[in-house]
Amino acid sequence: MKIFENCLLLSDVDGTLFTGDKVPEYNVRQIERFINDGGAFAIATGRNRQATQSLLKVVKNNAPTLLLNGAMIYDFNTEQVLFSITMNDSVKGHVQTIMSNPLFSNVGIDVHTEGKMYNLRKTYESEVHRIYEHLELFESDFDSIKNQSWNKVMYLFQNEDNIDALCSVLENTITEHCDYIRTSACFAGQRFYYVEVLPKNVNKGNALGEYRKIFGEKIKSIYCIGDYYNDLSMIINADIGAATGNAPDDIKKVADYVTVDCKDGAVGDFIEYLYRKERV
């Protein structure tokens, strides 16, 4: 039996596996080593199918991928959706509330469905996001897509100034049926800030239970690594959870292991730590 047989490693992308515009070579080599020793590796990301597929040309992924921060599990090998959860129709109207509020007139708005991604308000931030993630983004209005099944709504900000105000609106309008999380990404040396609205109780941590249902007894251990608040639940719920060296301090505090910074090969460092534990 190989050392990591029946083990699954899930890695966040931005700020964890991927730094700026590249994946450190050390990560690539260590992931291949982990897979060769029987392990299953998959990406766990807030990105959709299209944006994630381009990454798979760089990093080997031999297990179903966690998408949309836990709203979908997709098998790129069989092109099958293994798990998907959508938003309650009753909360879609909150998008109109945000769009009509002058305080949020410069906030970009994207809607993710199972098959496509729609832009309801185009901004500089939404364009950077589209380019950064290699997205095919369809411009639309609310009425044209309101009857589709939504997996996620994404608000994209110029800076952090209005994030608290938008979260306050969400807290008062949608939290009975949906959750929201703050996320971010760094592109060309600049950090961009987002708020993502997801179906109730959807997060990366709860998605680990869906992986256990899919694999059954084929999984004995799940390892997870991330760098930000949308990764917190999977770091906590993993059998072994790691935070990157560039993660906020409160994320590091709940992790079993803190790696080097993302730019120095955080995923590779975590895999090396797993090898050391197996040798003990």
Image (spheres, rainbow, N blue to C red):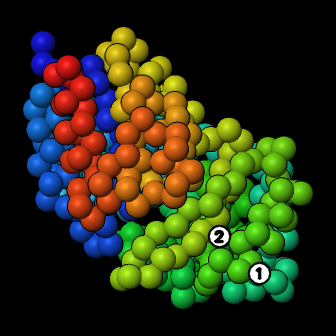
Task: Residue 44 in the image: state x and y as whole percent.
Answer: 41, 46
**Which quarter of the figure is the N terminus placed in?**
top left
Query: Residue 26 shows which numbered tag?
Result: none
Compared to residue 262, the image places residue 71 above or below, namely: above
| Foreground of the two, 97 or 116 | 97
Secondary structure at badge 2 equals: strand
Q: Which corner quadrant holds the C terminus?
A: top left
Of the residues under marks 1 and 2, which one precedes in the sequence?
1
Q: In terms of depth relative to the viewer, which is nearer, 226 or 179?
A: 226
Does any portion of residue 54 appear in the rendered image? no
For badge 1, the amino acid type reads Phe
* Amino acid marked by disc 2: Tyr
Estimate how packed mark 2 is, as few (under 14), some (14 to 19) or many (20 or more) residues with alpha carbons within 10 Å: many
Q: Residue at x 69, y 86 (%)?
A: 106
Note whether 149 is above or below 143 in the view shown. above
Q: Position of residue 109 (x, y in %)?
A: 65, 73
Q: Secondary structure at mark 1?
A: helix
- Residue at image point 27% right, 42% down: 270
Q: Which residue is mark 1?
A: 104
Residue 170 in view, yes or no: yes
Q: Give the residue pinned by disc 2.
A: 155
- Label 1 neighbourhood size at 10 Å, few (<14), some (14-19), many (20+)? some
Residue at x-position 32% and y-position 49%: 259
Front one among 49 and 67: 67
In-front residue for pair 163/217: 163
**Image side of residue 121 versus residue 136, left or right:** right
Marks 1/2 in contact by CB < 8 Å: the verdict is: yes
Badge count: 2
Q: Answer left or right for 171 relative to 8.
A: right
- Residue 163 coordinates in the image, percent (x, y): 71, 72
